[in-house]
Amino acid sequence: MPTILDAEIRSQPDIVESLLQQELPRIAEIAAQLPAFDYVLIAARGSSDHAGIYAQYVWATLAGYPVALAAPSLYTLYSAPPRLANALVVGISQSGQSPDIVAVLDAARQQGRPTIAITNDGASPLGQAADHVVELHAGAERSVAATKTYTAQLAVVAAFAATWSGQPDRIAELRQVPAAMRACLAGAAEIAQAAERYRYVESMVVVGRGYNYATSFELALKLKELTYVMAEPYSSADFRHGPIATVHAGSPVLLVIPSGLVADDLLALCGELRARGAELLIISDLNEALALARTPLPLPTQVPEWLSSLTAVVPGQQLALHLALAKDLNPDEPRGLAKVTRTR
């Protein structure tokens, strides 16, 4: 069955490629114009918050900036905005419409701090509240579940990381990502077939670490909103600190294991989970990881670990889409959800 969501998932490589072409010079200009700052505060909700989690890792590893996620209720419900001395404040929002995210940037500007909006609508309230705006150029996202705007946000975050790093090779690596994303899309038929197996699953654990800690949150959200599976995200470290006790024979666990520094830890966790009888779904470019899976979800092209979040999310998006179809659900209109959510 053709769906809008499938078309939007497939559009992601072209969108990221176009975004980089249009916005990399702009991002370099913004980086050069920013006053000195010591850390970054990010305000976001939903999938955009997961892009913020990615920023916590990539802006720290490549540029050395500590990154904190804002608590917007402090600015709205409690009317108690904290001191933002020495902060760069960044709002990330697909629509740019949510009042609580705008409130964080308003407070930052009142305190004289620099602000950036990353949004699909530069004319939105968020865009108007910011000193600098980076647009996603993703076009109208008609399916309720965010896909193309999420990966566009990741691309912007990665572009700032590469720019701040001062290493031209990082920009070159980033420009290779759209081709790697296209390769990931080639496995859709196999993922659709694999999804049938999980039609009656009611719960699932999603595990990632490092750069793909964000991916675990984003894929858990996609499974919840598209398939109504109660999917819970964890880092492999946090999962060992108690939640692993919930695993029993047949428990489905989705793991994101790209090449890189986190792979050994996640492979070790796979051994622990298999000993408990868990059924593993594994997104990876490593043959040794895929060999451990009941349901392997291959990443056909290897990218540097700092960029793996942009590729690893794609087979997970496809899994959620095809599991929704296997359950006879409409992935374009999840129950009780709207495209734009405004929170205060």
Image (cartoon, rainbow, N blue to C red):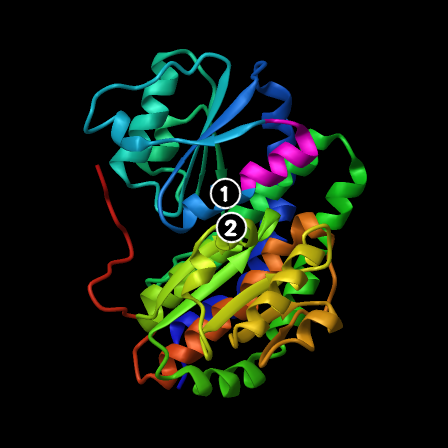
Residue 239: in magenta span: no
Can residue 6 be seen from the camera position used here?
Answer: no
Q: Badge 1 is on which residue?
A: 53
- Compared to 127, does 273 lie above or below? below
Quarter holding the C terminus is top left
Residues tagged 2 and 1 counted as in contact (Cβ below 8 A): yes
The residue range painted magenta reads 55-65
Residue type pointed to by label 1: Ile
Gap in Å between the C-alphas at discs 2 and 1? 5 Å
Residue at the spot 65% in from the left edge and 47% down from the top edge: 21
- Say above or below: 32 vs 158: above
Above or below residue 333? Residue 58 is above
Q: Which residue is drawn at 59% across and 62% down?
A: 256
Q: Which of 22 and 199 is in front in this view?
A: 199
Residue 155's x, y, as percent? Answer: 58, 48
Seen from the viewer's position, the closer of residues 94 and 216 is 216
Q: In this view, does 176 lie to the left or right of 181?
A: right
